[in-house]
Amino acid sequence: MYIEVKDACKQFIQDKKEFLALDHVSLGIEKGEFVCLLGPSGCGKSTLLNVLAGFEKLDSGTVTIDGEEITAPSPSRVTIFQNYGLFPWRSIQKNIELGLEAKGIPKNERRSIADKYMKMVGLEGLENRYPRQLSGGQQQRVAIARGLAVDPEILFMDEPFGALDAITRMKLQEDLLQLSRETKKTILFVTHDIEEAVFLADRIVVMMADPGRIKSIVKVPLGAHRDRTQDNFLHIRDRIFELFHMKTDSYIEYYI
């Protein structure tokens, strides 16, 4: 198993009260798989992503990637957040080149790589603009291009489309699905949107709160080309909605 979480526990104190963000969570993810962590606020999905990215440490349990225990962030793993994280004083091209500069890539090579990923995410012709001159959707494309430019093994994405309008969000979902098939990157994507999870994921990890835990893991056998209006898509969406009302925890697979 490429990514492996075993019996992970993480406790926080909020308003002088202790709560379990992760309660004995175990999960395996294969290389090249697109997995969505789906659930309400407080279910531990962002905490689990932060642990895997190396930003948080567990109280107990282990997390490993390719057999190595995670103790800190790594350039081989890129995290993309909802707030874009772009530098306003750098052009779009220079924002995308940021990680390449840190790796010591020569200037001409940086330009070539940045051009490649600007084209991939539909930003051709905007390389000399600044973040303030772009829409929210375009800024998130820059963040995705910057992440891909350093050729990471894994992309961690924490509700990256949550602040966008519905039409832009749907377009970026379509683009991300295509990118994931083209690049074959391992992607762990946090969302609270059921339809978004069904549209993107190979598997959906359904999480619940108080304490944060995995309720079910759902396989999504819809292939690379997905239609939100088709019966099989709607069936999986509706069945996942029903999971949030089930009292028992179970491993569930759907074959349409």
Image (cartoon, grey):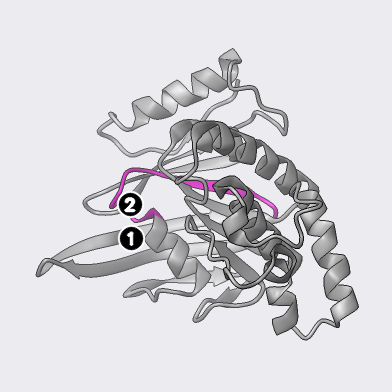
Q: Please name the predominant secondary structure of the magenta segment in the image.
A: loop
Which residue bears the numbered disc 1?
A: 24
Residue 223, picture quadrant: top right
Q: Which residues are magenta?
A: 30-45
State whether residue 97 is above or below residue 81. Answer: below
In the picture, the quarter occupied by the N terminus is bottom right
Q: Residue at x 40, y 74 (%)?
A: 56
In contact (CB < 8 Å): disc 2 and disc 1: yes
**Rendering coords of residue 51 (x, y %):** 44, 69
Circle 1 SS class = strand
Out of 45 and 124, give the one closest to the viewer: 124
**Rendering coords of residue 244 (x, y %):** 32, 33
Residue type indicated by callout 1:
His
Residue 110, picture quadrant: bottom right
Residue that lies at the very extreme toward the left in this rendered image: 16
Locate residue 161 relative to residue 186 in the image: left or right. Answer: left
State whether residue 114 is above or below residue 27. Answer: below
Q: Mark 2 and mark 1: span between their CA atoms?
A: 7 Å
Out of 221 and 137, give the one closest to the viewer: 137
Marks counted in the figure total 2
Q: Where residue 213 is drawn, which disc sits there?
A: 2
* Front label number (2 vs 1): 2
The first of marks 2 and 1 along the sequence is 1
**Rendering coords of residue 31 (x, y %):** 68, 57
Q: Is residue 101 magenta?
A: no
